[in-house]
Every structure is written in structure tokens, then in C-alpha cells.
Image (cartoon, grey):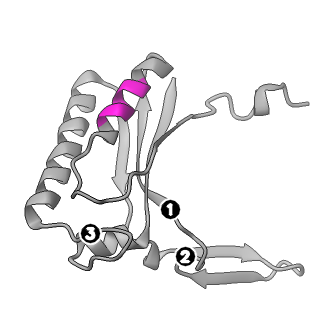
Amino acid sequence: MKYLVMVQGAQADYDAMNGKPSAHSPSWSEQELRAMFAHMNAINDDLAESGEYVDAQGLVEPARTRFVTVDAEGRPVVTDGPYGETKEVLAGYWVLDCASLDRVTEIAVRVARCPVPAGSPVFPVVIRPIDEAGGSDFAGGKTA
């Protein structure tokens, strides 16, 4: 079964990785950044070797986000950057093809053990099964 494994972050975390600490997140050193990337690359290498790796991407900072909705008349409404109340956003993800939820949970635990500077916020690693049935079992019940 395929799973989406997601890591979260905030604009303050991206800023901290670029040397701008805040009350939310301490500044990262070059050595700490290298350790984080080495940890993630090792996970990717192991997943590719095991055949479970489908895709993985880190996402750019939330400040470069664009939100697109439509108004009551169906006209586009485009907003740059996260809303002020946005605390966490998707920072990166893996699409994995694993034999079980237990296996993908083992991988998520490994992701969660990524080295970060002391005092950094802790975000959960989120696992979502991918609906490969095309919605035929939406919300646990059959669609009409």
C-alpha cells in the first residue's frame, strides 16, 4: 500500500535554517544543517534500496506559498504567503510503498529522530494512506 509521510514546519523554522533565530526556533549552524540533510539522505537511500521509495521532496519556505480560491462569483482569489494565523505547514514529504502501516510507522519514527538544534520545535511526522482505489471507499463507506 502507498502512504504519504509528511513533515511539518513553520516560516520561523526556515528562517532559523538561514541563520535568523526567533523565539520559535533557534538558529541552525552549518554543521547542524549538514547533519539534518545527511540523516534525510540516508533514509532516502535506504528506502530506494528496499524498493519502498516512490518520491520525496522538501518544499520551499511558506513565504513563497500561493493560495488560490474562488469567490462567490467563481473569480480567482490569489493570496501570496501563508495566512497570519498559519502555524504549521507541509515542509516535505515521502510517497512510500510499504507492506504495512507498522512498516511505514517504523520509517516515520526514523524521520522523527532527525537531528535538530536544541530548543527547536518538535512537529509530528504525519502518515496518510493513499487512496489507490480512486475514492471507491471514501470515508470508510462505499460511494454511490
* Rendered-image quadrant of the C terminus: top right
Q: Which of marks 3 and 1 is nearer the N terminus?
A: 3
Provide the secondary structure element on which disc 1 rests. Answer: strand
Q: Where is residue 90 in the image (x, y as percent from the top left)?
A: 48, 57
Amino acid carrying label 2: it is: Pro
Residue reaching furthest left? 31
Using the image, determine if residue 80 lies above or below residue 1. below
Residue 109 falls inside the magenta stretch: yes
Neighbor class of circle 1 (other Cα within 10 Å; few <14, some 14-19, many 20+) is some
Alpha-carbon span between mark 3 and mark 2 = 21 Å
> Which residue is found at the position 73% from the left and 81% from the top?
76
Provide the secondary structure element on which disc 2 rests. Answer: loop
Neighbor class of circle 3 (other Cα within 10 Å; few <14, some 14-19, many 20+) is many
* 138 and 14: which is toward the camera: 14
> Which residue is found at the position 71% from the left and 82% from the top?
77
Q: Position of residue 20 (x, y in %)?
A: 26, 80
Q: Mark 3 — residue? A: 26
* 5 and 124: which is toward the camera: 124
User: For residue 17, what is the image quadrant?
Assistant: bottom left
* Magenta extent: 104-110
Amino acid carrying label 3: it is: Pro
Neighbor class of circle 2 (other Cα within 10 Å; few <14, some 14-19, many 20+) is some
Q: Is residue 80 left or right of residue 61?
A: right
Using the image, determine if residue 89 lies above or below residue 92. below
Amino acid carrying label 1: it is: Val
Q: Do the residues labelled 1 and 2 touch (CB within 8 Å)?
A: yes
Using the image, determine if residue 21 lies above or below residue 47. below
Q: Can residue 83 be seen in this view?
A: yes
Rendered image: mark on residue 82: 2
